[in-house]
């Protein structure tokens, strides 16, 4: 029974919307109506924000002001469909579409520019709650030691390690938790590898390895060469010298070219 | 004959042009979802936002209210804090008396529907009647919100008055053309409303209430009789209606007033006499000849009556002021039906009454010379001058004369009367003055109506000029040049070191103090040319020179002979780049009534009138052109075309005329006649005759021309084409002569209304493109730049704002890559078009501009909410694909979404909203990344925008400390490790 009623009312709304669409432009003649409503900024008294706020109906076609209790009335609005906006530089409000029939029946609904005929009803008289101050500014990306320490990348594995140890102590082994734990342990292992290992290597390697050993040194040099991925790529300084020498050889006379040829042959 | 031919061919062409209908917007839910995902990416790419710590660093806003119509001081005590004003710009505001700043301000609808017709002040409430007598509002002046608001019956407002009783004020009476109504002051509810008898014949204009339970209403029929009606306050019944024969009556306003206990006093200008009629008794009016009062009357007697405007609780006093001529006033007293002269003021500029406690004073302003003024208070009771009330002050010589005087009188501790004066001048300035003549604050309300503006580069400093001079001078030998070089290098070093010193000195001071005062003497260009001079022209005929970095007014100039409604055009003829010659601006002022223009040449940096005499124009000017041709003084040529299509050249030296003759074949211009719906193209002959070469007629029975917009002359386009996904190049159609013409349909029915956009070549008159937008109506806003046109309109079918972008391309090959000629373009361009929904109402659109055109463009959109939105042009790209492909992704094209996004980070003015935006001026700066923006309307807002972020300069949050500490740290560690290594080596050697 309820479902049927809902469908019927939706259908009626649709009819209403159609009629509105046809008659929205008949201005000038006919009765004038008023749009009423109330806006609330949670936690702020109306007298602290209404002096910068206005109610705009379809751009600046009709303008309304707030009363000291946060209610507003926009007078002399002919029948039609309008977008009612509450503009305030300090608080953000969602716009509302208000339909007024030629008989003066008024309803409010969500603004949908894509589907103008879609009706999601809102209470009338309009009740709008601010969603807070608009985010006008970007956040600066700051860098500090605390950021480094508080980075969630470090926190999560730490937490896991601590909780793992804690739970080991309590020797609670829930099968359901086990899988998750394994994953977490894996993550923390990676963390240990990424953060701790390099530190250990940097600090401990020189102590462990005897750098005075000539064999060891040769081995290390070799491994360093291995690390350098581009053997083919010439060194920058080498490249520059070659560039300049070739230029001078080009600009130089034939004898010079012969000279360089001789050099090459050597 | 020739004209006919062109016209005919044009018509033929007209028919052949295919009208391309723009793509309609359809609902694509999937697309929206897709694009929203994409927008997450877009957020990182387009950034017009600023950081919170940048607030006020390079932007400023000045708020204005406009020319006051009514002004009231809040309390008659010395520590009054507020001034309530309602203005011609439909603003009601409360100003702080200590510094002149706005405490709160409410901006009503523009135009006559928002006009505030009346303001009354009572206690802490201001009562206003606005909208042509439609709305009665009561404002809480402490909060800035409404106590109540009620609708009045239709009919134009005549007057209104507060009705007081012994116990206080309870009602407000509103007199309309045909009715009178009484409302409770506490909630606005109507107590009673009555139609006026014979309202179509009798003009009712005066209300009077003595507080005795009756309201008197005075009406008149000009040259015939007066009607006095007495209403019962309780029920609105007519107690008494009296008709008095008065053949001398002309009108009630200004000429009549109610003095003392309900005695109607009128001036009869013809017989030079006063008529006195007590309202409460049935006497016949009594005539008093002014000569009997020993008053000297001028030949042309234009008397006016000024009554004391006291509070409704106190009966108006028996004294009144009679204005005999422009500067001659008389203070008169009416006692027992006898009028006596209290004091004669022969040289008074303005007179105003003020009440404090039970004392009524008259303030008389006198002029000593054109700029020096004095105010004195006189007791209204006996006409004696009050001691210690003289106030002498000087007005700026570039100001207008005083127009209105508001006196804030109060009782001092010793019971004597003290006062402060608010002077309103003809150039819409408000000056608040304290005894004995100290100006506390000045508000330049003319800036609420800026009509046009230009930004001019500041001159170079002395050292910079010295350096420039080095290159300009003729060489006198290599040695001398070398010495010169060395000396200028030294000067540079000196300047740099002094700047460093100053920087260190300033760093110790708090930020607010460190910003040193900018005066006209120390004006100099900064290194990136970010600071400029804003030359603003206001509707009142006052010019301002404003420093763009701080908003300080550096000079002002008032033209007294400018009539209201004149139109202005500003042309920068010579910039500051030509050092020994001063910069030169020319203002073309066109009078509305006579349509005649006058030229005013001035230096934009100092505001001084130039010694150059501009030509006298005898015929109305239709069009003005600033040509890139320069005379030997580097001043650009201004061509003025009058209504006979004759050309006036300014400056008109021999050199210029010669150059004009040489380049005449390439000079074309167009004229638009919106009434006849005609666009005409002309060309210039060698002998400066003009010849019409084309004409486009737009049928006026269906359409009217609303906008004709060309491209900006200082615009640079860096890239000639766009590289597409397949590595081919799409070349832009960059026609500098292209005009975008927008017409609206005459029929405004929502089914049949349409707008039409024509792209017309201004040289040949060829219509390059025509597009019709059905079921659309204005107001249309157009931006025309590079190879694109963006226009905005209202879709009547879907009841939403839509934006359409048109982009013109030559194709993958350029016809002539070296130069563009309108006369040699055999191929018509490719046109791409796409439409979008803009989810808000728009008040103006403008595009950013940069020095070289490398930086990407943004659209600056002024919204009714007061925000200025910076929307990346990439969102308005007709090649946005519906389904993104590999190639479109490579081109960085955003997938099509019907609705354009509005993000609050894109508001360039964050919470500094700008009311009633009338213009957005953009100017390039010395930095390619930076565009200077000035938004003007009721307020003025200046800022900088970086459409592609600051790519050519270090950001202001660049962490110098971190970088230098890391650097020093590294140097330090290398030094230490070096030392350690040395020690280690030494130890090893010892081993």
Image (spheres, coloured by chain):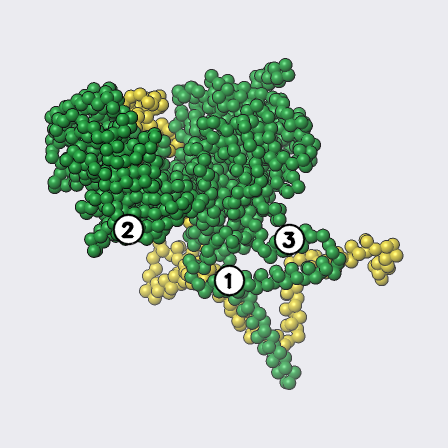
Chain colours: A yellow, B green
Instruction: Please tell me how crowded label 3 is: few (under 14), some (14-19), or many (20+) other residues with Cα within 10 Å.
Output: some
Q: Which residue is mark 3?
A: B468
Q: Quadrant of residue B177?
A: top left
- The residue shown at (34%, 63%) is A167
Asked whether, in this view, residue B57 is left or right of residue B68, the answer is right
Q: Are marks 3 and 1 in contact (CB under 8 Å)?
A: no
In this rendering, would B610 be left or right of B748?
right
Q: CA distance from mark 3 to mark 1?
A: 25 Å
Percent of width and height locating residue B374:
34, 47
Mark closest to the chain's N terminus, 3 or 2: 2
What subunit carries mark 3?
Answer: B
- Is B756 in front, or is B397? B397
Look at mark 2 in the image and give the residue it sits on: B389
- Which x, y percent locates residue B750? 39, 22
| Mark 3 vs mark 2: in front | 2
> Which numbered circle lies on residue B953?
none
Chain under numbered label 1:
B
Q: Nearer the viewer, mark 2 or mark 1?
A: 2
Q: Residues within 10 Å of mark 1 (few under 14, many from 20)?
A: few
Q: Quadrant of residue B8?
A: top right
Residue B251 seen:
no
């Amino acid at each position: 029974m309820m479902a049927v009623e809902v469908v019927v009312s939706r259908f009626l709304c649709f009819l209403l919307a159609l009629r509105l669409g046809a008659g929205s432009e008949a201005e000038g003649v006919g009765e004038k109506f008023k749009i009423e409503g109330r806006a609330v900024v949670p936690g702020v008294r109306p007298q602290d924000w209404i002096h910068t706020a206005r109610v705009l109906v379809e751009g600046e076609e009709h303008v309304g002001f707030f009363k000291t209790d946060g209610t507003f009335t926009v007078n002399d609005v002919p029948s039609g469909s309008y977008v009612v906006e509450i503009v305030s530089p300090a608080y953000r409000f969602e716009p509302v579409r208000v339909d007024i029939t030629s008989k003066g029946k008024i309803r409010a609904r969500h603004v949908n520019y894509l589907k103008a005929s879609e009706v999601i009803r809102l209470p009338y008289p309009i009740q709008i709650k601010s969603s807070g101050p608009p985010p006008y500014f970007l956040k600066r990306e700051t860098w500090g030691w605390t950021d480094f320490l508080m980075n969630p990348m470090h926190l999560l594995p730490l937490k896991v390690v601590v909780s793992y140890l804690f739970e080991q102590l309590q020797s609670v082994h829930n099968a359901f938790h086990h899988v998750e734990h394994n994953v977490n342990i894996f993550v923390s292992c990676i963390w240990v590898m990424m953060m701790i290992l390099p530190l250990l290597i940097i600090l401990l390697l020189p102590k462990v390895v005897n750098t005075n050993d000539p064999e060891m040194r040769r081995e290390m040099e070799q491994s360093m060469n291995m690390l350098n991925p581009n053997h083919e790529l010439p060194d920058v300084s080498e490249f520059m010298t070659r560039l300049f020498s070739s230029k001078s050889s080009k600009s130089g006379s034939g004898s010079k070219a012969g000279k360089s040829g001789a050099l090459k042959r050597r | 004959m020739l004209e006919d031919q062109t016209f005919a061919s044009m018509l033929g062409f007209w028919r052949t042009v295919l009208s391309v209908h723009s793509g309609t917007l359809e609902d694509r839910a999937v697309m929206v979802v897709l694009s929203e995902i994409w927008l997450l990416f877009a957020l990182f790419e387009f950034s017009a936002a600023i950081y919170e710590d940048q607030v006020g660093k390079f932007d400023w806003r000045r708020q204005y209210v406009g020319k006051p119509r009514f002004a009231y001081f809040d309390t008659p005590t010395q520590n009054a804090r507020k001034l309530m004003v309602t203005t011609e710009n439909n603003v009601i505001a409360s100003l702080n008396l200590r510094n002149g700043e706005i405490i709160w301000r409410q901006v009503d609808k523009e135009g006559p529907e928002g006009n505030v017709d009346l303001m009354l002040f009572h206690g802490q409430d201001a009562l206003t009647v606005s909208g042509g007598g439609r709305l009665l509002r009561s404002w809480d002046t402490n909060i800035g919100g409404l106590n109540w608001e009620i609708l009045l019956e239709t009919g134009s407002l005549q007057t209104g008055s507060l009705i007081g009783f012994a116990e206080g004020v309870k009602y407000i009476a509103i007199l309309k053309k045909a009715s009178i109504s009484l409302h409770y002051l506490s909630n606005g509810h109507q107590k009673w409303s009555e139609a006026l008898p014979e309202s179509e014949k009798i003009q009712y204009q005066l209300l009077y209430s003595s507080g005795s339970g009756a309201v008197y209403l005075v009406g008149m029929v000009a040259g015939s009789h007066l009607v006095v009606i007495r209403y019962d306050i309780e029920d609105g019944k007519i107690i008494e209606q009296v008709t008095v024969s008065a053949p001398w009556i002309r009108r009630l306003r200004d000429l009549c007033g109610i003095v003392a206990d309900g005695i109607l006093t009128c001036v009869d200008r013809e017989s030079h006499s006063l008529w006195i009629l007590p309202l409460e008794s049935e006497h016949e009016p009594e005539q008093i000849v002014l000569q009997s009062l020993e008053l000297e009357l001028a030949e042309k007697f234009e008397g006016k009556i000024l009554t004391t405007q006291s509070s409704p609780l106190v009966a108006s006093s028996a004294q009144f002021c009679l204005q005999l001529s422009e500067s001659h006033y008389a203070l008169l007293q009416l006692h027992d039906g006898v009028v006596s002269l209290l004091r004669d003021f022969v040289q008074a500029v303005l007179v105003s009454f003020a009440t404090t406690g039970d004392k009524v004073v008259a303030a008389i302003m006198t002029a000593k010379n054109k700029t020096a003024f004095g105010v004195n208070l006189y007791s209204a009771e006996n006409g004696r001058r009050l001691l210690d009330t003289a106030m002498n002050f000087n007005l700026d010589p570039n100001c207008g004369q005083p127009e209105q005087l508001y006196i804030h009188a109060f009782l001092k501790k010793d019971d004597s009367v003290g006062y402060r004066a608010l002077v309103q001048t003809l150039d819409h300035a408000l000056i608040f003055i304290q005894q004995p003549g100290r100006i506390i604050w000045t508000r330049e309300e003319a800036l609420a109506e800026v009509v046009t503006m230009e930004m001019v580069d500041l001159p170079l400093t002395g050292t910079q000029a010295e350096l420039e001079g080095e290159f300009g001078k003729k060489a006198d030998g290599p040695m001398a040049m070398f010495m010169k070089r060395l000396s200028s290098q030294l000067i540079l070093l000196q300047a740099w070191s002094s700047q460093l010193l100053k920087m260190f000195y300033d760093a110790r001071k708090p930020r607010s103090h460190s910003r040193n005062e900018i005066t006209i003497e120390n004006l100099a260009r900064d290194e990136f040319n970010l600071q400029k001079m804003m030359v603003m022209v206001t509707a009142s005929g006052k010019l301002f020179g404003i420093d763009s970095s701080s908003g300080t007014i550096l000079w002002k100039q008032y033209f007294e002979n400018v009539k209201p409604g004149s139109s202005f055009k500003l042309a920068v003829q010579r910039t500051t780049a030509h050092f020994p010659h001063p910069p030169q601006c020319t203002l073309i002022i066109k009078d509305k009534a006579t349509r005649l223009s006058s030229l005013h040449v001035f230096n934009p940096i100092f505001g001084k009138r130039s010694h150059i005499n501009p030509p006298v124009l005898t015929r109305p000017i239709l069009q003005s052109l600033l040509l890139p041709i320069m005379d030997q003084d580097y001043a650009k040529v201004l061509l003025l075309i009058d209504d006979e299509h004759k050309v006036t050249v300014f400056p008109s030296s021999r050199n210029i005329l010669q150059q004009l003759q040489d380049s005449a074949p390439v000079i074309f211009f167009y004229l638009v006649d919106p009434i006849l719906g005609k666009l005409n193209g002309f060309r210039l002959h060698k002998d400066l005759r003009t010849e019409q070469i084309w004409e486009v007629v737009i049928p006026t029975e269906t359409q009217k021309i609303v906008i004709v917009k060309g491209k900006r002359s200082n615009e640079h386009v860096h890239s000639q084409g766009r590289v597409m996904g397949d590595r081919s190049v799409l070349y832009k159609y960059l026609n500098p002569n292209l005009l975008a013409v927008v017409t609206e349909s005459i029929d405004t029915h929502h089914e049949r209304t349409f707008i039409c956009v024509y792209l017309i070549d201004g040289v040949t008159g060829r219509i390059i493109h025509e597009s019709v937008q059905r079921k659309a109506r204005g107001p249309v806003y157009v931006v025309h730049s590079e190879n694109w046109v963006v226009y905005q309109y209202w879709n009547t079918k879907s009841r939403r704002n839509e934006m359409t972008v048109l982009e013109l391309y030559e194709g993958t090959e350029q016809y002539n890559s070296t130069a563009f000629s309108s006369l040699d373009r055999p191929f018509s361009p490719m046109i791409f078009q796409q439409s979008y929904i803009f989810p808000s109402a728009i008040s103006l659109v403008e595009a950013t501009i940069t020095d070289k055109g490398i930086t990407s463009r943004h659209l600056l959109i002024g919204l009714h909410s007061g925000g200025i939105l910076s929307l990346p042009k990439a969102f308005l790209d007709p090649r946005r694909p519906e389904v993104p492909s590999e190639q479109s992704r490579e081109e960085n094209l955003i997938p099509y979404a019907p609705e354009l996004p509005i993000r609050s980070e894109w508001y360039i003015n964050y919470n500094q909203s700008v009311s009633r935006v009338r213009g957005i001026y953009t100017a390039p700066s010395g930095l390619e990344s930076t565009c200077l923006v000035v938004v003007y309307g009721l307020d003025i807002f200046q800022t900088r925008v970086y459409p592609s972020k600051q790519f050519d300069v270090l950001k202001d949050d660049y962490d110098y400390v971190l970088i230098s500490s890391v650097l020093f740290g590294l140097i330090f560690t290398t030094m230490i490790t070096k030392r350690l290594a040395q020690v280690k080596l030494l130890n090893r050697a010892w081993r």
